[in-house]
Amino acid sequence: MQKPRRASKTGKKTKPAARRVTRTRTVNLQASVKMRAAQVDRELGRTLGRLRDFPAHGGVSPPTRLLAAMAHSLLAGGKRLRPVICIESCVAAGGHAPAAFRSACALEMVHTYSLIHDDLPAMDDDDLRRGQPTCHKAFDEATAILAGDGLLTDAFLVLAQAPRNPLRQVTELAAAAGSFGMVGGQMDDILAEGQDPAQVELEAIHRRKTGRLFVASSVLGGLCAGAGDREIAALRTYGAALGFAFQVWDDVLDVVDTTGKGGKGVGRDEKHDKATYVRRHGLDGARFLAHQAADRAVHALKPFGKRGAVLAALARYAVERDH
């Protein structure tokens, strides 16, 4: 393994955030994420099949159109970041990846529900998501609302069958997704539209809107592995820092991304007059904050040693991606 480069003898200074983030074991993140995402995609397909044929319903299946709308958004691909974090957190805590598959699917179902509702005309009014028409464009508004409702509720049906710590996992995800977490953050974000960015509590908003689901992703993975309190606390710190890094970098990309790789519209924040880290701190300031958060995420992984290498690489990716 190549040793980290030491400081230059010339005394030339570099940005500490960038240097700290690169001092982790190199892994092939693209290959690792691709493998995990393929596992998640397979499990999501199986999960929808189980919902269709779930025996407790006495042979009554969900309406075909509803399932089609749910599948349209759930199986559309994407980074699968939250389920990947869940699976890799399980591995980092000493567990086996399959032990986290149900939890990973539940996380992606909750995340996808939030995207369906975000895209509605009453919210962000977007036409594209993950490179294809949004659910309400492909179907209709009422069906999209119900598809989101179905994914959210069925996610807990899936999570309740997790092989380890199901009650703790349900409690963690419910707190992260509901009025205390993501939904509350959404409300805060709407109320902040049009306000002076200097007067908006951005970190508090995004800690709930984005960060809580990242925290749940890492904590659920630890619970799948039967991790102890110290490891769970470390994963919680990691998830919070990673979620912050992703949110700030998303604000950056909303301004600078001209590639169209994100599969959604660019300039959405400005369109909705949203308070963002770029508006408050400028592009360079927002970039610096994101790198600082990535540093914190990497530091939190010390108790896991080499088992946390993929999670550390995800922290680097958070502030290096172009979409």
Image (cartoon, rainbow, N blue to C red):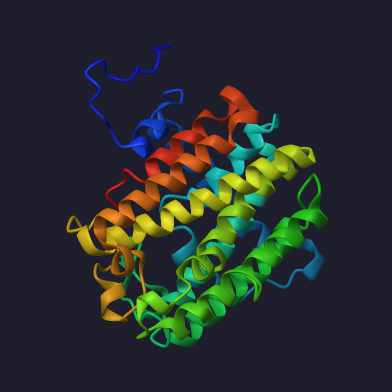
Image location (x, y in percent) of residue 292: 42, 46
Image location (x, y in percent) of residue 120: 42, 81
Number of callouts:
0
Image location (x, y in percent) of residue 19: 36, 31
Where the N terminus falls, by quadrant? top left
Q: In the picture shown, does residue 197 fall above or below 24?
A: below
In this image, 155 relative to 164: left or right?
left
Q: Nearer the viewer, residue 52 or 198?
A: 198
Q: Nearer the viewer, residue 294 or 32?
A: 294
Q: Residue at x 64, y 64 (%)?
A: 176
Q: In the picture shown, does residue 4 fall above or below 41?
A: above
> Would you identify the image quadrant in which residue 308 lies?
top right
Q: Residue at x 67, y 57 (%)?
A: 50
Residue 70 seen from this side: no
Image location (x, y in percent) of residue 227: 76, 37
In this image, 12 relative to 197: left or right?
left
> Would you identify the image quadrant in which residue 183 lies?
bottom right
